[in-house]
């Protein structure tokens, strides 16, 4: 028996409310002006989306990462980044923070002082702000997409 194709319950709420879209676009613009490495931000987006099981964000994140020069080999190893030698120390710090900040319910002190110090070794305040905002925006979109059952492969 074939499973029916998932249909979105509604258009993404961020698209329905124009002021929300403008605000989100402004945050993305600020992230882009931070000096943070684009590939690192793509990895952050993908890892948070994997954790949250957001198929449209995983799909879109992989597409975007490839477009921005990321390799298939590294993208296939994001979920197991701790066991891979393909990621830099800065990327590891960003991925560790992504996992902790995405799984807040698992640990009330999710982002430890040690984790913060490790990330601070690799990112200045603007870059670290971009990483944190990317984690937050990804989690926002993961929750929106999951709630409205946005199917993978959809474009905005």
Image (spheres, grey):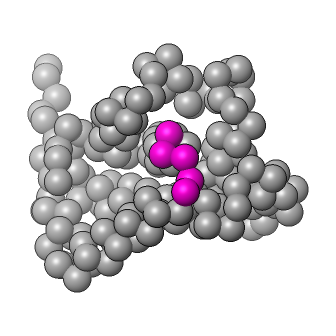
Residue 49 position (above or below residue 107): above
Visible residue check, residue 62:
no
Asked if residue 149 lies left or right of residue 69, the reply is left
Which residue reaches farthest top? Answer: 73
Where in the figure is residue 103, as x and y percent of width and height?
62, 55
Where in the figure is residue 38, as x and y percent of width and height?
48, 45
Q: Residue at x 70, y 20 (%)?
A: 85
Q: Nearer the viewer, residue 123 or 151?
A: 123
Q: Nearer the viewer, residue 52 or 133?
A: 133
Q: Quadrant of residue 107?
A: bottom right
Visible residue check, residue 10:
yes
Q: Residue at x 65, y 29 (%)?
A: 87
Where in the figure is residue 61, as x and y percent of width and height?
37, 40
Asked if residue 38 lies left or right of residue 17, the reply is right
Where in the figure is residue 91, as x and y percent of width and height?
65, 40
Q: Residue at x 14, y 73 (%)?
A: 16
Residue 103 position (above or below residue 70): below
Q: Quadrant of residue 67?
A: top left
Asked if residue 16 lies left or right of residue 143, the reply is left
Asked if residue 147 lies left or right of residue 78, the reply is left
Q: Quadrant of residue 105?
A: bottom right
Q: Quadrant of the N terminus?
A: top left
Magenta region, mostly helix, strand or loop?
loop
Which residue reaches farthest right? Answer: 114
Instruction: Inspect the magenta stretch and tell me whether residue 38 lies in it.
Output: yes
Q: Residue at x 13, y 35 (%)?
A: 5
Q: Nearer the viewer, residue 71 or 115?
A: 71
Q: Quadrant of the C terminus?
A: bottom left
User: Which residues fall within the magenta stretch?
Assistant: 35-39
């Amino acid at each position: 028996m074939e499973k029916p194709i998932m249909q979105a319950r509604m258009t993404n709420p961020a698209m329905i409310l124009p002021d929300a879209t403008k605000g989100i676009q402004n945050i993305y613009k600020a992230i882009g002006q931070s000096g943070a490495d684009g590939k690192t931000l793509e990895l952050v987006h993908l890892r948070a989306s994997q954790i949250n099981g957001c198929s449209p964000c995983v799909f879109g994140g992989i597409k975007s990462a490839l477009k921005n020069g990321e390799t298939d080999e590294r993208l296939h190893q994001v979920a197991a980044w701790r066991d891979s030698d393909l990621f830099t120390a800065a990327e590891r710090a960003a991925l560790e923070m992504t996992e902790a900040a995405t799984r807040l319910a698992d640990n009330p002190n999710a982002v430890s002082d040690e984790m913060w110090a490790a990330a601070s070794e690799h990112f200045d305040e603007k870059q670290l702000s971009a990483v944190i905002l990317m984690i937050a925006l990804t989690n926002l979109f993961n929750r929106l997409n999951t709630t409205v059952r946005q199917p993978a492969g959809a474009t905005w």
